[in-house]
Image (cartoon, rainbow, N blue to C red):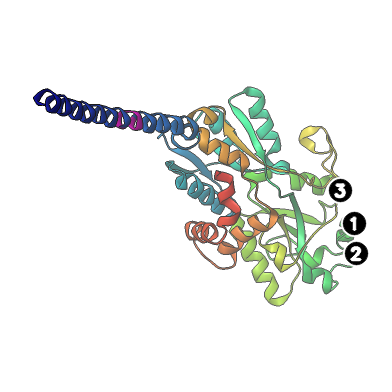
Amino acid sequence: MIWAESHKKQSTQLRRMCRLIREIEMKKLTRNIAVAMSLSLAAVSGPSLAADSSKPIVIPTHNWSSQVVMAYVIGGIFESMGNNVEYVPADTQAVYEAIRNGDVTISHEVWQSTFGASFYNAMQKGGIIDAGTHAAMTLEEMGVPQYVIDDNLCPGLPNWEALADCPEVFATADSGGKGRWLEGPQSWHGNQMPERLAGLGLDDKYMVKFAGSADALWAELESAKKDRRGVITFNWTPNFTDAEGFVFIEFPEYFEGCRVGDGGNGACGSPKGWLKKAANYKFPKTHPAAYTAFSKISFTSTDIGQMAALVDIDKMSHQDAAKKWLADHADVWKPFTE
């Protein structure tokens, strides 16, 4: 009897011990599974979310509204992904050398007509890569407000040949009796427009004045609009003026080699073209998640026009315009980060 009770106690203790061992082993197993799952998730999500360098992504700002607003928009996208961002003013042509040298990380508005040659020259030297193309198609050209056509101030426009018969319509106090073309800053296109006037045989009737900034172009358009006077300015699309009414002059069609710098006489218009993105060649390695998002970014003409309008029409600061655009269009940009 005593032996039976003792054996029963031992059996009970043994069962308890076995149960305790099983509980301990189960806890170990659960902990090991949790660790394994954590490591597995890190392996999957780490490179896309946490592998970017803490080194700032350097974004250039130029001298027209859509480019500056888009700089802060893209910077905001990078920051939403946990990246550090810096903004630096940069020359519109020299920026591609700065990207090659690693002083600047990206360029987000590479306009084919104006900057295509500088971009490709830099690519041939190495150190800069093509990071994709926006959905928007572009045109950079001289033109007139819609009312110039509607009021028939220069009959025959937008055909360029009509310009020969109405230089006085576009003359200003500082144009020496000639019609005036108000071009963008000279750093944008060099002497392309004076060379075009000469090539078309219009240089005895028109002269080119270089504006100091894009803002000077918009100020002249606004001033001319008040009394519906004739004005010829440089402009581009996509831009906020798309909604306001602007007509590009139809010059002889562009072809490779027509510009003076390429061996031609300059008597041609600007090509319709692409809007690309560029990046330093190390960017995909130092910031793989940010580069993946950047390569996906593809803004439409409407997107870009909206960004510019927030500054040029609504008179917001570039930073505030970017914040508003990001807040209002999360459905557009968030998929780029996924």
Residue name at image x 67 percent, y 24 percent? 124
**First reached walking from the N terminus: tag 3 or tag 2:** 2
Check if mark 3's residue and mark 2's residue have beta carbons within 8 Å.
Answer: no
Q: Tell me the residue that label 1 is attached to.
A: 161
Q: Position of residue 84 (x, y in %)?
A: 42, 41
The residue lying toward the viewer, choosing from 3 and 125, is 3
Residue drawn at (65%, 69%) of the image = 222
Tag 2, which secondary structure? loop
Q: Is residue 173 above or below residue 42?
A: below
Circle 1 Cα neighbour tier, 10 Å, few/some/many (<14 / 14–19 / ≥20): some
- Under mark 3, the amino acid is Leu
Q: Which mark is residue 156?
A: 2
Residues packed near mark 2 inside 10 Å, few (<14), some (14 to 19) or many (20 plus):
few
Q: Is residue 43 left or right of residue 234?
A: left
Judge from the rendering whether residue 36 lies leftward or rightward of residue 260; answer left or right: left
Q: Label 3: which residue? A: 200
Magenta stretch: dominant secondary structure? helix
Side (left or right) of 112 relative to 4: right
Q: Is the C-beta separation of discs 1 and 2 under 8 Å?
A: yes
Return the disc, 1 or 3, that comes first in the chain's sequence: 1
Q: CA distance from mark 3 to mark 2?
A: 16 Å
Residue 93 within the segment the image draws in magenta: no
Left or right, 194 with respect to 36, comes to right
- Residue 176: image location, x then y, percent: 73, 60
Given residues 338 and 283, the one toward you in this image is 338
